[in-house]
Amino acid sequence: MQLTALTQPTPEDLRKEIRRCRQMTKNPFGVNLTLLPALVPPDYAAYAQIIIDEGIKIVETAGNSPGPVIRQLKAANCTILHKCTTIRHAQSAIKMGVDFLSIDGFECAGHVGETDITNFILLSRARQSLGGVPFIASGGFADGQGLAAALALGACGINMGTRFMCTVEAPIHQKIKEAIVDAQETDTELVLRRWRNTTRLFGNNVAKQAVKVEKESTTGKFEEVAEYVSGKRGRQVFLNGDKNFGVWTAGQVIGLIHDIPTCEALLTRIEREAVETLQLKQDLYIQDGDRPVSSIGTVGKKTNNPGAEVWGVGKSKL
Ligand SMILES: Cc1cc2nc3c(=O)[nH]c(=O)nc-3n(C[C@H](O)[C@H](O)[C@H](O)COP(=O)(O)O)c2cc1C
């Protein structure tokens, strides 16, 4: 579990939140520190210092130019998980000394980056190109089938954002959870592309209006869209339950979310589904005596699961 540092207005508030979290759980937790373009950037070094002073050992960094913060945290022996949306950024982060990575596909909620590569490609590229540095998969995960797929592609686990919004424990209005359950995978909008700060939001009236203004603006001035994408109004949505009151973050995975379980029920279900999925897919192997033979490259061979026969593709970058 990760606390998000910048939901706290000041570094001192983060200190209080870390202490509050410690009283609520005996389990370990980390803190996320996201570095994003802002007119007045937060004092990231001060937030990082509170994280260090409070004895947090696992920190998730995300966003632009994390070098100085990573150096500060590494000097204090923190384990760093860096979240990124491109292999190039992942490789730079490894050079800066991060311990593992969270690979965030284009499906994800929030900052999707500018390259629009979805996890089917991104995760395999991570497996091929990160020199064995471990990574988790992020963006588009809500069930055990997704977890099984992420593991198959080389990830060590998954990170979920939107799915956890739709749990009993999530401290947001019930009507917003219901709006997520009612939504389809097509109900998100990408805003701020013009300013290379592309962000995936729930596709409500305000987000649609923001996109319209962004596309039609002749000046290209951020001020024209600023009132629509106000974080302050967005946060009110979670309190007043009016899904159209402001913009709020959600990923394409909303199309896969159909209920509002407790976190415990959700995680138990995901684990069970993943195990079942991985076991069931063993049928895709063709038995040749006692020797299992991968169906890759076995064009035309008979299997006990003919519909699952896989045709050899003859090309691999590995
Ligand atoms: C409401 C909400 C707030 C988020 N805030 C942050 C944030 O402050 N920093 C960050 O790095 N990621 C943030 N994220 C992104 C998640 O950490 C994660 O990368 C993303 O949700 C994964 O995609 P998914 O929603 O499909 O699971 C947020 C996501 C949601 C849904």
Image: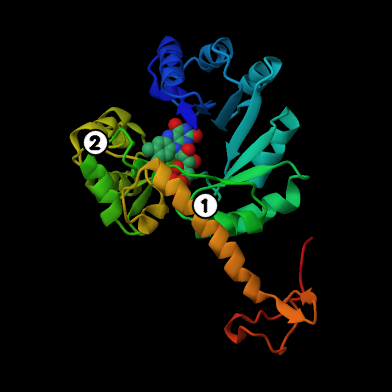
Which element type, helix, strand or loop, lies under badge 2?
A: helix
Instruction: Answer yes or no: is residue 197 visible.
Output: no
Is 83 on the left-hand or right-hand side of 228? right
Residue closest to the eye, 272 or 231: 272
Residue closest to the eye, 201 or 264: 264
| Above or below: residue 49 compared with residue 283 | above
Is 76 on the left-hand or right-hand side of 199? right
Near mark 1 (Cα within 10 A), the count class, few <14, some 14-19 or many ≥20, is: some
Q: Residue at x 40, y 42 (%)?
A: 263
Q: Name the image quarter holding residue 10.
A: top left
Residue 100's disc is none
Residue closest to the eye, 106 or 193: 106
Near mark 2 (Cα within 10 A), the count class, few <14, some 14-19 or many ≥20, is: many
Residue 271's disc is 1
x then y, percent, for residue 107:
47, 52
Q: Name the image quarter holding residue 19.
A: top left
x then y, percent, for residue 304:
64, 85
Residue closest to the eye, 18 or 234: 18
Query: If the image is split into quadrants, where does the C terminus sit?
Result: bottom right
Residue 237's disc is 2
Q: Residue at x 25, y 37 (%)?
A: 246
